[in-house]
Image: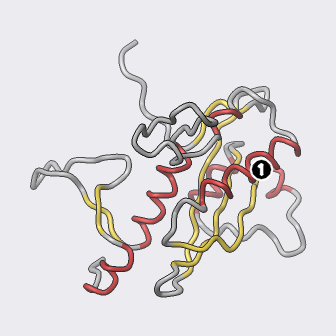
C-alpha cells in the first residue's frame, strides 16, 4: 500500500513491530498506515507499566504501557474480564492518534452462544484464535485526523485450566 504524503503526515511511517529485517534489500522493515497504529497499540499493550513510583519497561517514558502483566496465571472469569477491559482502555488512551470507539472481550463461548447482534469480529485470525480456545480483546477505533475506522485484535493465551498463560505476540522459544 502506498500512502500519500498527507496520510504519512497523519499516521506516520516507522519500524515494524515486532522488529523485522528485510533479507532481500537489507535494513529494517517499515510499517505505515493503519497497520502502524495497530502495531503501536500492540506495543503499548505488551509493555509492562508498573504502578508509581516504580519505572516501567521504558525508563524514559514510565507512563507508557499497560498493567496486563498482572493477569498472568489467573483464571478467566467475569471479574478478570472486567479488569482486562479497564487496563486495555487505560492503555489504548495512550495512543493519541486514535479515538477508541468500542472494546469487546470475546471468548470461544461468545462464538458458541452469540448475542443477537453477533460478535463484530470480522477477521479470520480472530475466529481462528477463538476456535483454539484463546480469548481476545477487539479494539475498535477511529483515526482522529481523517476519521478512518479500524480495529485491533489482541489475543490472550490460556492453559488447560483456563488460566491466562500469555498475551500478545508469542516469541518462539530458543534452545531446548
Percent position of residue 28, x then y: 20, 52
Task: Identify whether 163 is placed above or below 124.
Answer: above
Q: Quadrant of residue 164?
A: top right
Please, is residue 164 above or below residue 21 in the view? above
**In the image, farthest residue toward the left:** 25
Residue 106 lies, in percent from the top left, at 75, 55
In the image, 81 versus 48, the foreground residue is 48
**On screen, residue 86 above or below 168:** below
Which quarter of the rendering shows the N terminus? bottom left
Residue matched to label 1: 108
Q: Is residue 22 left or right of residue 60?
A: left
In this rendering, position of residue 140 left or right of residue 9: right
Measured as percent of width and height from the top left, residue 171 is found at 44, 34
Q: Quadrant of residue 127?
A: bottom right
Of residues 18 and 89, the one drawn nearer to the viewer in this rendering: 89
Query: Which residue is found at the position 65% from the left and 30% from the top?
Result: 165
Image-based side of 21 in relation to 140, left or right: left
Amino acid at each position: 500500500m502506498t500512502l500519500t504524503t498527507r496520510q504519512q503526515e497523519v499516521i506516520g511511517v516507522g519500524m515494524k513491530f515486532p522488529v523485522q529485517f528485510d533479507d532481500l534489500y537489507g535494513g529494517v522493515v517499515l510499517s505505515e498506515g493503519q497497520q502502524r497504529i495497530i502495531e503501536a497499540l500492540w506495543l503499548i499493550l505488551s509493555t509492562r507499566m508498573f504502578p508509581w513510583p516504580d519505572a516501567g519497561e521504558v525508563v524514559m517514558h514510565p507512563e507508557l504501557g499497560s498493567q496486563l502483566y498482572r493477569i498472568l496465571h489467573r483464571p478467566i472469569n467475569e471479574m478478570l474480564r472486567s479488569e482486562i477491559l479497564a487496563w486495555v482502555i487505560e492503555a489504548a488512551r495512550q495512543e493519541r492518534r486514535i479515538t477508541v470507539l468500542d472494546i469487546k472481550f470475546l471468548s470461544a463461548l461468545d462464538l458458541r452462544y452469540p448475542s443477537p447482534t453477533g460478535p463484530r469480529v470480522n477477521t479470520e485470525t480472530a475466529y481462528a484464535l477463538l476456535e483454539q480456545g484463546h480469548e481476545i480483546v477487539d479494539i475498535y477505533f477511529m483515526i482522529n485526523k481523517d476519521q478512518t475506522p479500524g480495529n485491533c485484535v489482541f489475543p490472550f493465551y490460556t492453559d488447560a485450566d483456563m488460566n491466562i498463560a500469555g498475551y500478545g505476540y508469542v516469541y518462539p522459544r530458543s534452545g531446548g
